[in-house]
């Protein structure tokens, strides 16, 4: 392609520069891996690790696929011979099968924002790598499985009062709700109308970030299709991984009164509060008479709970309309089962610790927004159907993503410690609107490109073949 001096297509120039930089970066990665492998070869125990030559492999990075050769070793243990790659072990190769942590993180983040096909397309356009939707799905499943293992270990530690959380707070706010999702395949049997995914969040307050906007502070979240007992254990593990639970004096638990939510009342420090949205919704749905609604709500806000229940019962007995009577009876049963949670925690006459500077203790009611933001926006609608396993794995990623913990979590999973000589790294952030789909297979970006006379400095990039830090 020949570019005229006047009226150049800068977008094309940007794409071509990006291609060249990706080529240079792949050569740099290949050189670093090669030197690292040789350094490991020199330091190994030669009696234990017998060198058996080199084997070609591919390492997928944000710059594209890096093809390189690494040393193969044979070890003998208890008379059994096996093959090992010291470089793979040093790089912490896990379930993503020779894929860099940066690329893995980019794929997971993209899958949290869009369907797998759209995520694959976005990653392919933003990097020097070609990714299929199945590759995106595989990465999410692999990462979800590892996060699940970490949550299980955190649950076990929490059960032994050995949580590793460090954040101290006298009050912890918890809110829980469920969302029904459509299932697919064999998981749909017996769940034709969908299965409820349980979602829980916890936070230690809120801070103002706008005129009428607040942000929950130190928020954690978890979601799963599992049973009540297992989910409560998982939730406790997620909390204990962040908070020092020994310092929590009181927990305020908000929910719609479902039995699985009430199961989180593990001791006297947990105080249940019926979610205001569901509470008011019940009055509107069950009571058609406006005057009756006003009277019931007035007694509710005045904390006259026993009197309110008597009034609802009287309305039910005094009406001749069967539908109205059923509504009153349904409302009476709902309020009676959740009588201990009808009064907000702020007006129960209890002493509430003063919040730290910059934070506020607000009324509960963040769950409706969070259940849509965390799960509903990505997993519900659009004819989406999930397997139980696949839905759980994506939900774990979504919980981390929307609580701003995904990058740190994936960083711990994809830990890759370089030798000391590569400690000082220079990171260059590159972005481009689009990158040719063929780039991922090693296309060098030089073909059919003529450098304009006013931009001869581009040739300096083109001349670079291998760049190593020494």
Image: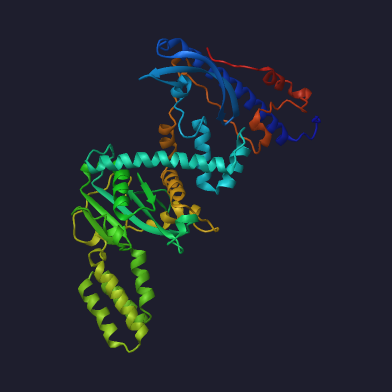
**Is 283 located above or below residue 398 in the figure?**
below
Residue visible at 23% across and 69% down in the picture? 303
Image coords of residue 152 (percent x, y): 33, 42
Q: Is residue 51 above or below residue 116?
A: above
Question: x, y (%) of residue 373?
Answer: 45, 53
Outermost residue on the bottom side: it is 320
The residue sitting at 54% across, 48% down in the picture is 114
Left or right of 133, for residue 264: left
Res 307 quadrant in image: bottom left
Q: Is residue 243 visible?
A: no
Residue 256 placement, left or right of 104: left
* Residue 348 vs residue 370, the one in the foreground: 370
Residues 174 and 28: in front is: 28
Is residue 15 depicted above or below 375 in this figure?
above
Name the spot of residue 39 as percent of width and height, x first.
47, 12
Q: Give the side of residue 146 with respect to residue 243, left or right.
A: right
Q: How many marks?
A: 0
Q: Can residue 118 be seen here?
A: yes
Residue at 34% in and 73% down: 283
Residue 275 position, x and y percent, is 33, 62
Tell me which residue sits at (45%, 64%) in the image.
193
How is colour applied across the structure in the image?
Answer: rainbow
Q: Quadrant of the N terminus?
A: top right
């Amino acid at each position: 392609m020949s570019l005229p001096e006047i009226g150049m297509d800068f977008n094309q120039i940007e794409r071509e520069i990006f291609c060249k930089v990706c080529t240079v970066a792949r050569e740099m990665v290949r050189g670093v891996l090669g030197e690292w492998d040789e350094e490991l070869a020199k330091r190994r125990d030669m009696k234990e690790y017998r060198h058996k030559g080199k084997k070609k492999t591919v390492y997928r990075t944000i710059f594209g696929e890096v093809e390189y050769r690494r040393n193969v070793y044979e070890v003998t243990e208890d008379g059994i011979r096996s093959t090992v790659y010291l470089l793979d072990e040093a790089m912490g190769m896990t379930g993503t099968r020779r894929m860099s942590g940066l690329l893995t993180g980019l794929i997971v983040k993209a899958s949290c924002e869009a369907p797998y096909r759209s995520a694959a397309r976005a990653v392919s356009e933003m990097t020097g790598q070609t990714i299929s939707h199945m590759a995106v799905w595989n990465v999410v499943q692999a990462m979800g499985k590892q996060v699940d293992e970490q949550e299980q270990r955190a649950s076990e530690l929490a059960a032994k009062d050995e949580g590793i959380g460090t954040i101290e707070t006298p009050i912890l706010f918890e809110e829980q709700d469920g969302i029904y999702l459509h299932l697919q395949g064999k998981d749909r049997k017996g769940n034709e109308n969908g299965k409820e995914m349980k979602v829980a969040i916890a936070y230690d307050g809120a801070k103002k970030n706008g005129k009428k906007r607040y942000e929950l502070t130190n928020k954690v979240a978890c979601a799963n299709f599992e049973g009540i007992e297992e989910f409560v254990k998982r939730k406790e593990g997620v909390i204990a991984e962040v908070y020092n639970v020994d310092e929590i004096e009181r927990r305020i638990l908000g929910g719609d009164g479902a039995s699985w939510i009430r199961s989180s009342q593990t001791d006297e420090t947990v105080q249940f509060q019926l979610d205001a949205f569901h509470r008011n919704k019940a009055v509107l749905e069950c009571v058609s008479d406006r005057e009756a609604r006003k009277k019931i709500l007035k007694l509710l806000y005045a904390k006259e709970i026993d009197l309110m229940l008597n009034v609802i019962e009287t309305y039910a007995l005094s009406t001749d309309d069967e539908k109205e009577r059923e509504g009153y009876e349904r409302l009476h049963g709902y309020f009676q089962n959740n009588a201990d949670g009808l009064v907000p925690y702020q007006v129960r006459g209890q002493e509430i610790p003063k919040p730290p500077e910059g934070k506020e203790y607000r009324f509960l009611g963040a769950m409706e927004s969070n259940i849509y933001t965390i799960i509903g926006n990505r997993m519900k609608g659009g004819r989406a159907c999930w397997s139980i396993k696949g839905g759980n794995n994506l939900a774990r990623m979504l919980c981390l993503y929307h609580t701003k913990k995904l990058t740190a979590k994936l960083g711990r999973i994809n830990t890759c410690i370089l030798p000391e000589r590569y400690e000082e790294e220079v990171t260059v952030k590159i972005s481009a609107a689009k990158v040719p789909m063929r780039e991922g297979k090693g296309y060098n970006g030089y073909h059919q490109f003529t450098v304009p006379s006013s931009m001869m400095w581009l040739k300096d990039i083109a001349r670079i073949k291998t760049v190593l830090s020494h």
